[in-house]
Image: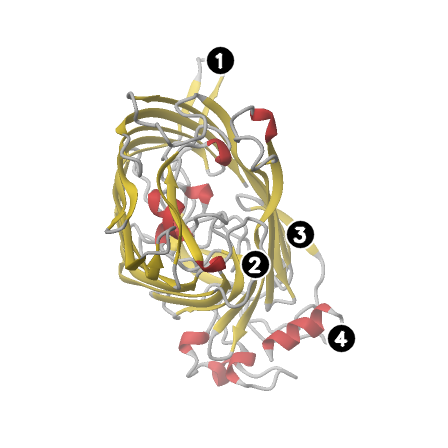
Amino acid sequence: MAVAACVLAAAGLVMPVRVQPVLAQQWSSAAMGNDTSGYQPPDQHAASPADWYADTIDQEAVSSESSDGSSEDTIYSAASGAGDVGTGAPQSQPSGVQVGEPHEVGSDLNLKATWRNGLEIESAHKDFRIHVGGRTQFDTVWLDASAGALDGAGGVGEGDAFNFRRARFRIDGTFWELCEFAAEYDFVNSVNDNVGLQPASEPLGNVIAVTAPTDLWWDIKEVPFVGHIRVGQFKEPLGLEHNNSSRFLDFLERSFNQDAFTGPFNNGFTPGIMAWNMREDKRLTYAIGLFKNNNNVFGFGVGDGEYALTARLTGLPVYDEPSNGRFLVHVGGAVSYRALDDHRIRIRSRASLRNGPGVLNPVLVDTGFFAGDSQTLLVPELAVVWGPLHLQAEYAASLVDSARNAAGMPLGTAFAHGYYVQALWFLTGEHRAYDYERAAFARVVPYENAFVVRRKTGPAFGRGAWQLGIRYAQLDLRDPGLDGGVVEDVTIGVNWFWNPNLKIQANYVFASRVGPDGNSGDINGFGMRLAHDF
């Protein structure tokens, strides 16, 4: 019913009517099965069996720690394109709107623009909202490898590189209150224009940038019994690191798990349909979706079957409400059962520093293509925030059923796995903010922005937020009859957040590799990133 209402509303055939307070959560009348033709007193909605299915973020007053460390009641948009649910700048109460005042959805179409770590334009009751944003990441990387360390890895070897890692433009928002959407495109995906004719690195002129969608979806809110239904292309609910936005990465790159398991050949975005929601107290989330298992960045898949069923469950057994999550424990796990695309699979990973566009990056470990019937992924996750300290770890295991090598020899169940552990510390006292809806971490808002200005008495400085981090990661693609190699690395990082929208990251990486062809050695690298998003 909610899906049909949104379709009719978008076509202008029906004007949804909903009674709700502006500053406090009100149960959806659609979710409760109530008549939506008129106003019902709030006390008739006070008790509801739909605790699990209620939308608990949209237009809700939440306690948030402000940039100066004080606590205030602040409300946030449910699907903020800036990704700052519970962490962004406060929204002011619409002029003339009273707490608990009933309203007809769409009755006020006047829009007001504001800056909430991104440009947002919205109506007084937030029935309509548009966020215009994007991200740009410019990387510089220097690598040095021991003799033989990158033999057989392809790409540009240990060549230094300057590269736009991401350049995305995004529009997302809400229409008729119950319907949300996102349309985001990345302009610097790279491909080899002469694949099969020239290696990607000889010469570099055959590497071109193509535009490809990342988030491209519609989301229907307050659907009875499930909460949200999302359709389109988006991230599968597969792990904490994978679901953390690339705007908020702790290091320049995610661990090997991303390249090998959770987002290998499609930028981490898959076409499908997903049901998801969180409990009223925000301590529990679930997501389950059916996806087309594809190996391209353009959001399509061709072939009978070849679907993936992916589910994730997360919880917050510890969460300190007064400090807005300055102390929390996050636990979760994901599982995915995947029919193989074209009945074959390749598991590989590039390095934790990318020297150039993707098609030019050396591949450190690689099984090559081998046949199989299906793949099962298991991804448990754990994170702790304790004041300025942030600890996080994940493990990923892959089991390919009825595996067969290139010669057709049966391999049984081919097993591969990887993991990482990391620790980060804010020298300036901030803490890692948490996004309830995504069950992942959100934007860092410095206590004080970085700046330098002239004054009559001399320069004045702002420090920004400073964070140190270290991560150990390993990926093992060795199994009887299948040798893709093994790689491990240590990443040491420094993050300098100038303000909520701009940061500089620096990473030193020491990696040790044993390749699938037996070539081995060590790789040292240093990389920096200037990142801006809004």
Category of crowding for the residue at label 1, using alpha-carbon neighbours closer than 10 angstroms: few (below 14), some (14–19), many (at least 20): few
> Residue beneath label 2, please?
301
Q: CA distance from mark 2 to mark 4?
A: 34 Å
**Percent position of residue 270, x then y:** 51, 57
Looking at the image, is mark 1 or mark 4 earlier in the sequence? 4
Q: Is residue 433 visible?
A: no
Kind of residue at disc 3 = Lys
Between 385 and 100, the one nearer to me in the picture: 385
Q: Which residue is mark 1?
A: 456
For marks 3 and 2, the one nearer the N-term is 3
Inspect the image, locate mark 4, and give the three-letter code of the amino acid beneath it: Leu
Q: Position of residue 191 (x, y in %)?
A: 57, 38
Label 3, label 1: how far apart the Cα atoms are: 39 Å
Checking the image for residue 13, the label placed there is 4
Query: Which quarter of the rendered picture does the C terminus lie within?
Result: top right
Earlier in the chain: of badge 2 and badge 4, it is 4
Of pointers 4 and 3, the one earlier in the residue sequence: 4
Evaluate if marks 2 and 4 touch, with contact meaning CB atoms under 8 Å apart: no
Q: Which residue is under mark 3?
A: 112
Point out residue 295 in the picture as x, y percentages from the top left corner: 50, 52
Q: CA distance from mark 3 to mark 2?
A: 40 Å
- Residue 185 seen in the figure: yes
482 w.r.t. 357: above or below:
below
| Kind of element beneath mark 3 | strand
The amino acid on which the numbered mark 2 sits, given as a three-letter code, is Gly
Callout 1 amino acid: Lys
